[in-house]
Image (tube, helix red, strand yellow):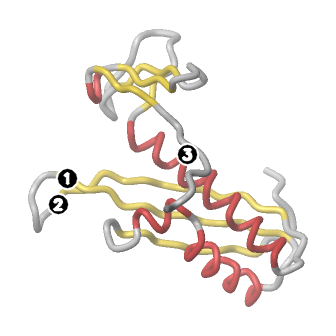
Amino acid sequence: MTKTILTSRATAVGGRDGKVASDDNVINLDLVMPGTKGKENIPTSNPEQLFAAGYAACFDGAFNLMARQDKKRVETRTNSEVSLLEDEEAGGVKIAAKLVVEVVGVTEEEAKDLLEKTHQFCPYSKATRGNIDVDLSVKVVESLEN
């Protein structure tokens, strides 16, 4: 039997023009269709932003774990884009993701190796593998400033 490590819960009401909240209310957002205005002074989001944030956070954490396992000291920043695309094959829409990891402290070759290890390990990557297009890249930088 698989051991559960963590379970997170959220509830959405009203779809893309509704609300979403986590069970502990840490996340409590109005949702709006991309390109439309929400209510004044109330933070709004959409499912693609929430997915992008989750994937970036998960991938960044996994990258750092892979680096620690390889006894490498790194600093990272993971930027993600999640796009809503027309699905020409099946009709409707689909999503695609792009992740760019900026890393300080390793060579280009080491960074690429860590990127591949991370993609094999990250739970979001496992969930999306074979289901959506995911474009991954890594940039070795001298600093994460700016």
How far across and how far down the image is residue 7, in percent?
54, 41
Q: Distance between the residues labelled 1 and 2?
A: 5 Å
Q: How far apart are marks 2 and 3 (CA)?
A: 23 Å
The amino acid pointed to by label 3 is Ala
Question: In the structure shown, which secondary structural element does the residue marked by tag 2 occupy?
Answer: loop
In the picture of the structure, the residue carrying the numbered disc 3 is 53
The amino acid pointed to by label 1 is Val
In the picture of the structure, the residue carrying the numbered disc 1 is 93
Labels 2 and 3: the sequence-earlier one: 3
Whether residue 67 is situated above or below residue 1 in the rendered picture: below
In the picture of the structure, the residue carrying the numbered disc 2 is 87
Whether residue 12 is situated above or below residue 141 in the rendered picture: above
Residue contact between numbered discs 1 and 2, judged by CB atoms under 8 Å: yes
The amino acid pointed to by label 2 is Asp
Labels 1 and 2: the sequence-earlier one: 2
Residue for point 56% across, 19% down: 25
How far across and how far down the image is residue 29, in percent?
47, 21
> In the image, is 120 to the left or to the right of 61?
left
Picture quadrant where residue 130 is located: bottom left
Whether residue 122 is situated above or below residue 116 in the rendered picture: above
> In the image, is 65 to the left or to the right of 30?
right
Question: In the structure shown, which secondary structural element does the residue marked by tag 1 occupy?
Answer: strand
Give the label on residue 55, or none: none
Picture quadrant where residue 32 is located: top left
Classed neighbour count for the residue bearing mark 1: other residues with Cα under 10 Å, few (<14), some (14–19), many (≥20): few
Classed neighbour count for the residue bearing mark 2: other residues with Cα under 10 Å, few (<14), some (14–19), many (≥20): few
Residue for point 46% across, 71% down: 135
Labels 3 and 1: the sequence-earlier one: 3
Question: In the structure shown, which secondary structural element does the residue marked by tag 3 occupy?
Answer: helix
> In the image, is 83 to the left or to the right of 40?
left
Q: Distance between the residues labelled 3 and 1?
A: 20 Å
